[in-house]
Amino acid sequence: MSLPAPADQDLLRTLAPQVLAALLRRHAGAFDACEDAVQEALLAAAEQWPRDGRPDNPRGWLVTVASRRLVDLVRSDRARREREERLFLATPQSELLGRPADADPDADRDDSLALLFLCCHPALTAPSRIALTLRAVGGLSTAQIAAAFLVPEATMAQRISRAKQTIRGSGLPFALPGPAEADGRLREVLQVLYLVFNEGYTATAGDGLTAPALSDEAIRLTRLLHRLLPRDAEVMGLLALMLLTDARRPARTGPDGGLVPLAEQDRGRWDAAAIAEGTALVERALPAGRVGPYQLQAAIAALHDEAPDVAATDWPQILALYDLLLRVAPGPVPALNRVVALAEVRGPAAALKELDALAGELDRNHRYHAVRGELLLRTGDAPAATAAFRRGAALAPSLPERRHLTERARRLARTGPDA
Amino acid sequence: MKYLLMTYGNQEKWDSLPAEGWTEAIAQQDAFNKRYQESGELIGAYGLGDAAACRMVGREDGLPVVSDGPYLETKEYMASFYLLDVDSEQRALEIAADMPWADREPVELWPILHEAK
């Protein structure tokens, strides 16, 4: 198989959820067969378009090929799924192939959204939601998703197949959730997209075509969601948070691959365009509606990104935003972040006092010990700070973080508190 | 996040188990493996040979030097290991506790920090 040109690849991935939605609109009960058919149509396009040229109506081409493939799939499964076949064949072929899929763009917009809600349904496990969203909405192949998460393709195929079984088995609807549950379901979708983003942000970026960068993919899908729900303030908030966080990526690792903490990053290397876009989104989101956790985290990220250095950061404002965040989304991790801001506003001793209250919940969290180390160091207790950094290093969930904290402890033990 | 789950034992322990229980024990372990392979959380399950089969390999003057292992002198040695990929530490703990023998022999669970691409 020849690799598609990048332009084709982008277009295919944009069209993937629309084509799947077009099939599902007619065969909502056959999610797994529709999804397989769309994947095969994408593969066929990736093979044929570079050779024969891109068709005039790429989306119609994909819908036609996928629909034919769906007929084949259902027929070949005759023995196993006779009941589905009866349902399927009861659908007039003209209904399936005749109607141009792009006749009603508004309906398709809603369908992409319904597809996203279905893939992020709470009846599915979190890893299944992620895998299915990346495949069905993101248009990635199982092999690409497996490469991005560094698991064997067979393992990823199991997650996708299990998710599809759950959808089939429990009859999850291909429809937008009703008003009563819409808010909660949208939160689930946002959470899946944020998990994908974080996975990409903490892992090393993949090598393009074979292992797509998950943070880029998360931003792309959140942009899609923002296009579908342009007035939702939390969707804006999440997109802003991703952009404002991702903007720091170029400065986040040093030349040796080591972690560079926010305070020491070369802010000239931050992505100014992403910061401008993220900041504009927060400014639109905050007055637009109910304030939610993503908007608040984005607002905090924007204050960091706007500051020329740590000293010039608007810490009182950040502290106020953390107070608000803890009210809408209480939890030990935002509480820990609030302590960092508190130290800048009211000094390390006051912050340490509040940090102690989190010891029970965060004793096995490496960042808790890292923050504690920094605060102890500022109060002049270098031996206790060294011990805290060592404890943090022992609990770190990734190698760069462990190296960073080990190095912090080592320098301090060797040269004293001025290191 | 990925975890390494390990079980330990020695020949003496295996010998003490009645032979008629083995089929059932193996069936239980197979069912565990299947369950978590199907959920997409078990990447692989591997059983190790006896400690007597373990060799230590070093290099001197560019040439391999092989001697009998194991390196550590302990009462029990690693018997099998399982590679998990789960969405939380909590989930890894649940799966570890579901190991068929976990009611008699605790298993070890190690977080994996890094893997080569």
Image (cartoon, coloured by chain):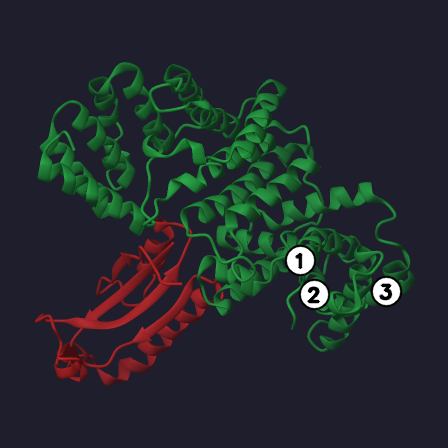
Q: Quadrant of the N terminus of chain A?
A: bottom right
Residue A319 position, x and y percent, is 38, 19
Q: Quadrant of residue A43?
A: bottom right
Report, in whole angstroms, how far the alpha carbon at label 3 lies from the one at label 1: 35 Å
At label 3, counting other C-alpha atoms closer than 10 Å, the crowd grade (few under 14, some 14-19, many 20 or more) is: few
A403 versus A67 height, above or below: above
Pointer 2 chain: A
- If you read the primary sequence from the N terminus, does the residue marked by circle 3 or circle 1 appear first? 1
At horizontal 39% and vertical 40% (from top left) the residue drawn is: A252
Choose between A42 and A104: the one closer to the eye: A42
For disc 2, the marked residue is A46
Pointer 3 chain: A
| Circle 2: residue type | Ala
**Chain A in the picture: what colour?**
green
Q: Is residue A325 left or right of residue A263?
A: right
Choose between A284 and A112: the one closer to the eye: A284
Q: Is residue A9 left or right of residue B109?
A: right
Res. A130 visible in picture:
yes
B100 versus A195 height, above or below: below
Residue B26 position, x and y percent, is 33, 78
Pointer 1 chain: A
A117 versus A374 height, above or below: below
For disc 3, the marked residue is A90
Q: Quadrant of the C terminus of chain A?
A: top left
For disc 1, the marked residue is A9
- If you read the primary sequence from the N terminus, does the residue marked by circle 2 or circle 1 appear first? 1
| Circle 3: residue type | Ala
Q: Are marks 3 and 2 on the same chain?
A: yes
| Circle 1: residue type | Gln
At label 2, counting other C-alpha atoms closer than 10 Å, the crowd grade (few under 14, some 14-19, many 20 or more) is: many
At label 1, counting other C-alpha atoms closer than 10 Å, the crowd grade (few under 14, some 14-19, many 20 or more) is: some
